[in-house]
Image (cartoon, helix red, strand yellow):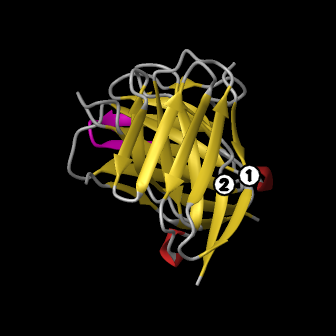
Amino acid sequence: KQEVTQIPAALSVPEGENLVLNCSFTDSAIYNLQWFRQDPGKGLTSLLLIQSSQREQTSGRLNASLDKSSGRSTLYIAASQPGDSATYLCAVGTDSWGKLQFGAGTQVVVTP
Amino acid sequence: GAVVSQHPSRVICKSGTSVKIECRSLDFQATTMFWYRQFPKKSLMLMATSNEGSKATYEQGVEKDKFLINHASLTLSTLTVTSAHPEDSSFYICSARVQGGKNIQYFGAGTRLSVL
C-alpha cells in the first residue's frame, strides 16, 4: 500500500526566506503527484500537478520536482510571504481515475 | 478555475440523527467525485469514490451503510451520515474530477460535522 510522508510537520520562517517542503512515497508506480494548499478549516487549493513522466512543474514562485526512482518530491516556494502561511499537502495519484493518497501535510508559518 | 460547492459548511446535530452533505460542481460536469474525511492535524483519508449513475466504491474499513453516497447527476453527489454518533465528528471534504480532463480534481470547502 502506498504511504506518503511529509517532513517537516511544521515550519516557521521569516518573510523573504525560501521554503523547502519534502514529500516521500513508498511505491514509485505513481500516476501523478500533486501539491495542495489548505487554509485553516477550509478546502484544498491545487498548486501544482506533476505527471509521472515529468520531472518538475513551475508556477510563479512555486516549483515542484519529482524523482520517482527515489520516491521523492520537493516543493520550493521562493521569497516567502506571510500570505503563504498555510498547510501544504502532498498527494500521490494512484490510478487513472483520480484516487489520491495524501500525506499529513506541513504547516507553514511565515512571520513578517 | 472550476468551482465545487459543498453544503453545509458546518453542522451540529444530536446523536442518532442523519446528516446529508451536498457536493456540487458549479461550472463543469463531474462523472467522478470523491469523499474524504480529515481528522485534526491528520491527512485526508479517502472514504469512497462516487460515480454518476452507479454505486459508490468504498475504501476498506469504511462502512457503506453508515456513509451513504448518491451521485444522481453529473453535478451533484451527496454523502449521508446515518445515525450519527460523536465518533463521526470530523471534517468531510469532497472533490470533483473534471470530465475528460487531465485527472484534475477541484475540492469543496469542506463540512465540519459535530455530533453531540
Whether label 2 touches label 1, CB < 8 Å: yes
Q: Hey, which quadrant is residue B62 in on the image? A: top right
Earlier in the chain: of badge 2 and badge 1, it is 1
Secondary structure under the numbered disc 2 in the rendered image: strand
Q: Position of residue B3 (x, y in %)?
A: 30, 55
> Would you say residue B81 is visible in this rendering?
no
Q: CA distance from mark 2 to mark 1?
A: 6 Å
Which segment is the magenta one?
B71-78
> Would you say residue B87 is visible in this rendering?
yes
Q: Position of residue B20 (x, y in %)?
A: 51, 52
x 49%, y 29%: residue: B49
> Quick check: B9 left or right of B98?
right
Q: Amino acid at mark 1?
A: Pro
Q: Position of residue B53 (x, y in %)?
A: 33, 25
> Quick check: A9 left or right of A40?
right
Which residue is at the far bottom? A112
Question: Badge 1 is on which residue?
Answer: A8
Image quadrant occupied by the C terminus of chain A: bottom right
Nearer to us of marks 2 and 1 is 1
Q: Amino acid at mark 2?
A: Thr
x 51%, y 69%: residue: A80
Q: Is residue B71 above or below residue A26?
A: below
Q: Which mark is residue A106?
A: 2
Q: Hey, which quadrant is residue B1 in on the image? A: bottom left
Q: Is residue B75 magenta?
A: yes
Secondary structure under the numbered disc 1 in the rendered image: loop
> Quick check: A9 left or right of B51?
right
User: Crowding near pointer 1: few (<14 within 10 Å), some, many (20+)?
Assistant: some
Which residue is at the far top? A29
> Is A58 or A47 nearer to us in this picture?
A58
